[in-house]
Image (cartoon, helix red, strand yellow):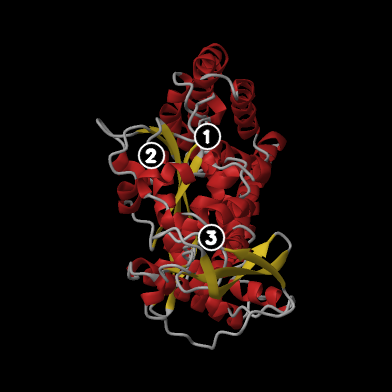
């Protein structure tokens, strides 16, 4: 009843002059459109919150339980690998098993490798004769199928001095384990590149009559990522050594103390390819249980280059005199105008989009040119457009309602553009943070297949795996082939020479 009275009073107060009435009608239409946009925006936000909190209807409690248990077990295995004794594998106490180890399937192809100590005694030079042999079977995966690798080590004795001789068993990625490096690589890529949870991988392998329990796979993943952690740390060091890097983060759900909380995966990228830099590209991920600014401050402590960022206040402590410099992202500026244009059809927003497009047209021309050439090009073509855009936006702001979405977008643009201007004078910088946003996409794809991180340890393991796999992809290296190669060597490799194991130093065999 009150609404009807209000509307009746409104219509009674309408002007009788046609011109004034038209103006009032246009104003009301604009207000209705703005409210409709706001309602639609709130609906989308509400839907997003509901999905983040409860998951889609197709997600079952069984899957949630698998996600949590799987990630928790990965974290436990990773910690066990880090604290394991450095003694010889044969002297190490066997780990507790939740189930008996089944023999490797008879139907699988056997590939035999004989490790011989030679024909002559190392002590006296006499001839060796065989007394017997030790056979170690290892489940391996070569592209397309499983095989059993039989490592045969003949036990030899000298016919002269009776000295015993036998070739040593090669070191293996997982102590006392039976997976070969190819199988470990396949499992890691399946989970963190192809986004297949381990329980699904277990079901897939079962169709090949290979029984690999999910708990076995979680143990392998945890121990493998712990073994590979120094390589991920080295990539992080190289990323932070560049004159400029790209920073961003994305939310991931983590189960803690019986309830879900929003954790974060931080991504830091060094990519000098657009300006013909010589350093190989790399991406370094870090996991945190929340989004506090202390995390990027810790990750990038001491960094004094330029950080491409999206305006998140958590990065602010990194910027200042004697610290890093900020390069703002113009894509975020553009997105706000695009949203307004799509919802309201604003001519001002459309014009802003066109002017920003002119800046990107120059960037298309500047891509893969040397930094000095990029500066010359930007000064000649981009700077006039950039200056004019900034001045034009300043003129538009007084002409519109300060409470409108358009005004908010303009204020945001005017606040970010002074921090974006540095790219005009430095060819090593970019106009946006898209390079880093692309590094976030694998994580967003993964979120659709696993609902939660089960623990901080599981998040740390994921960060290691993502660092290695995505760095491979940035260098056009097959991550599974490289991981197969590196897992066969990393246990015995000297850490001072870790650069030799980096993806950009690997050549396909």
Q: Is residue 124 left or right of residue 407?
A: left
Residue furthest to the front: 160
The residue under the point 56% across, 14% down is 377
Q: Residues within 10 Å of mark 1 (few under 14, many from 20)?
A: many
Residue 93 in the image: state x and y as whole percent: 37, 80
Quadrant where the N terminus lies? Answer: bottom right
Q: Residues within 10 Å of mark 2 (few under 14, many from 20)?
A: many
Q: Quadrant of residue 245?
A: top left
When the figure is inspected, residue 265 is found, relative to residue 477, above or below; the finding is below
The reply to whether discs 2 and 3 touch (Cβ–Cβ < 8 Å) is no
> Do we see residue 15 in this rendering?
no
> Do we see residue 384 in this rendering?
yes
As measured in the structure, the alpha-carbon distance from the residue carrying label 1 to the one carrying label 2 is 19 Å
Of residues 370 and 154, the one drawn nearer to the viewer in this rendering = 154
Of residues 318 and 197, the one drawn nearer to the viewer in this rendering = 197
Residue 431 in the image: state x and y as whole percent: 52, 30
For mark 2, give the secondary structure: loop
The residue under the point 38% across, 78% down is 257
Q: Sequence-wise, which precedes: disc 3 or disc 1?
A: 3
The residue under the point 66% across, 46% down is 343
Question: Which residue has dot 3 on it?
Answer: 119
Instruction: Please tell me the numbered disc located at residue 432.
Output: 1
Question: Which residue has dot 2 on it?
Answer: 240
For mark 1, give the secondary structure: loop
């Amino acid at each position: 009843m009150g609404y009807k009275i209000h509307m009746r009073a409104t219509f009674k107060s309408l002007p009788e002059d046609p011109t004034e009435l038209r103006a009032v009608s246009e104003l009301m239409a604009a207000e209705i459109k703005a409210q409709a946009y706001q309602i639609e925006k709130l609906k989308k936000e509400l839907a997003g919150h509901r999905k983040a909190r409860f998951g889609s209807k197709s997600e079952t409690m069984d899957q949630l339980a698998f996600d949590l248990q799987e990630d928790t077990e990965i974290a436990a295995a990773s910690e066990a690998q880090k604290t394991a004794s450095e003694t010889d594998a044969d002297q190490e106490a066997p780990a507790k098993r939740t189930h008996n180890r089944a023999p490797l399937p008879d139907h699988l192809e056997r590939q035999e490798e004989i490790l011989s100590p030679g024909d002559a005694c190392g002590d006296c030079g006499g001839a060796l004769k065989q007394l017997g042999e030790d056979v170690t079977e290892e489940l391996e995966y070569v592209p397309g199928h499983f095989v059993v690798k039989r490592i045969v080590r003949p036990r030899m004795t000298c016919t002269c001095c009776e000295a015993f001789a036998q070739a040593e068993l090669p070191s293996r990625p997982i102590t006392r384990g039976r997976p070969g490096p190819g199988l470990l690589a396949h499992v890691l890529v399946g989970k963190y590149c192809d986004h297949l949870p381990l329980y699904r991988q277990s079901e897939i392998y079962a169709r090949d009559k290979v029984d690999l329990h999910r708990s076995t796979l979680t143990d392998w993943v945890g121990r493998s990522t712990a073994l590979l952690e120094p390589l991920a740390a080295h990539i992080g060091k190289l990323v932070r050594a560049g004159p400029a890097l790209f920073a961003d983060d994305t939310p991931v759900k983590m189960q803690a103390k019986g309830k879900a909380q929003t954790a974060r995966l931080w991504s830091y990228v060094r990519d000098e390819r657009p300006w013909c830099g010589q350093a190989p590209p790399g991406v370094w991920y870090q996991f945190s249980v929340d989004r506090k600014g202390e995390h990027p401050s810790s990750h990038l402590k001491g960094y004094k280059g330029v950080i491409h960022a999206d305006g998140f206040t958590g990065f602010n402590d990194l910027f200042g005199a004697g610290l890093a410099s900020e390069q703002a992202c113009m894509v975020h500026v553009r997105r706000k105008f695009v949203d307004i244009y799509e919802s309201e059809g604003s001519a001002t927003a459309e014009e802003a989009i066109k002017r920003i497009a002119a800046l990107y047209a120059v960037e298309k021309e500047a891509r893969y040119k040397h930094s000095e050439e990029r500066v010359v090009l930007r000064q000649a073509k981009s700077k006039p457009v950039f200056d004019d855009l900034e001045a034009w936006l300043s003129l538009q702001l007084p002409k519109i309602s300060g409470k409108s979405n358009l005004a908010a977008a303009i204020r945001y643009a005017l606040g970010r553009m002074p921090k974006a201007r540095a790219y005009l004078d430095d060819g090593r910088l970019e106009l946006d943070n898209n390079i880093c946003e692309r590094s976030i996409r694998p994580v967003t794809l993964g979120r659709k297949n696993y609902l939660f991180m089960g623990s901080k340890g599981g998040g740390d393991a994921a960060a290691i795996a993502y660092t290695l796999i995505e760095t491979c992809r940035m260098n056009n290296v097959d991550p599974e082939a490289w991981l197969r190669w590196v897992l066969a060597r990393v246990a015995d490799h000297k850490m001072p020479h870790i650069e030799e194991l980096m993806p950009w130093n690997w050549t396909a065999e």
